[in-house]
Image (cartoon, grey):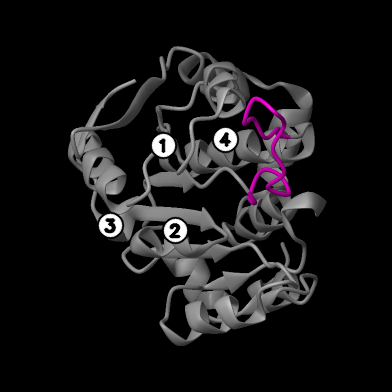
Amino acid sequence: MHSIQEIAAQFKGRFISAPEAIADKLHQIKAFVFDWDGVFNRGWKNAQGESPFNEVDSMGTNLLRFNHHLRNKKQPISAVITGENNNAAIMFAKREHFHAVYCGIKYKAQALDHLNEAYGIMDGEVAFFFDDVLDFSIAERCGLRIMVNRSCNPLLIQYALEQGFVDYLTEADGAHYALRETIELLSGLSGVYDDTIRERARFTPRYQEYINQRNQIEPQFFTIKDAKIATL
C-alpha cells in the first residue's frame, strides 16, 4: 500500500488542503454532489440545451461509490445539482441510479438544503465537485470541495481559493476528464484503492452486492417553482 504522500505526488493539481486533511475529510463524507456543465463536460451545449457526459467520468463515479461502499457498507447519497434543465443529466442519473437531480436551480444552496433534509445529512458530510460561480453557494458550506480547473478564468479561481472554497484544484479541465482525475485521487487517498479496482474487475460478490443495492435506487428529479424546490 502506498503512503498518502506517494499517492498525492502522482497528481499535478493543486492541493489547497494537505492530502492528509483531504483523506480525513473523505472519511466523513456521506454524499457526493456534482455540478454538471463544465464538470462532466466542457460546458458546450447543443441546440436543445443539452451537454453530454463521457464513459470515463461515468465509470469514475461508479468506482467512487463502490469505494465508499467498501469502506462504509452502505451506499453514498449521489446527486447532480445544475443551474440548467438538461436531459443528458437526467438520463445519466437514471442509468447510474443516482438519488437525485436538481435542474434549473440558480441559487444552488436551496438544492443543498433540500438534499440535506431529505437524506438526513449535514453540510460537512457532503463532497462537492464544481467549476463556476453559481456553485459557490454550495462550495462555501461543504465538507470536501473539488474545483475543476479552467485556464480562461484565473481570477475566478483565485477568488475561490482566497475565499476558502477549494480543497483540491484539478490539473485537467472538464473536457479532459477532470472528474475522473479527482475520483482517482479520492479513491487513492481512501486506503482501499487496490481493493476497489480488484473487486470491480473480478465482479466479486462484494461488487455484486453493491451494484444490486445501487440499481434499486430510483432517482428523484426536482426543479424550482415559485421560489421553492418542487418535483420536476
CB atoms at circles 2 and 1 under 8 Å apart?
no
Mark number for residue 135? Answer: 2
Q: Measuring from the top left, give residue 210's x and y in whole percent.
A: 53, 24
Q: Nearer the viewer, residue 171 or 35?
A: 35
Q: Of discs 3 and 1, which sits in the foreground?
A: 1
Q: Residue beneath label 4, please?
A: 66
Mark number for residue 123? Answer: 3
Task: Give the answer, above or below, for where 59 lies relative to 141.
Answer: above
Q: Measuring from the top left, give residue 115's x and y in whole percent.
A: 28, 39
Q: Which of 137 and 74 is in front in this view?
A: 137
**Amino acid type at image mark 1:** Gly
**Amino acid type at image mark 4:** Phe
Mark closer to the chain start, 4 or 3: 4
Q: Measuring from the top left, give residue 46's x and y in whole percent.
A: 72, 31
Q: Residue beneath label 1, please?
A: 104
What is the crowding at mark 3: few (fewer than 14 residues within 10 Å), some, or many (at least 20)? many
CB atoms at circles 1 and 4 under 8 Å apart?
no
CB atoms at circles 3 and 1 under 8 Å apart?
no
CB atoms at circles 2 and 3 under 8 Å apart?
no
In this picture, residue 180 sits left or right of residue 227: right
What is the crowding at mark 4: few (fewer than 14 residues within 10 Å), some, or many (at least 20)? many
Mark closer to the chain start, 2 or 3: 3
Mark closer to the chain start, 3 or 1: 1
Magenta region, residue range: 38-53
Number of numbered discs overlaid on the protein picture: 4
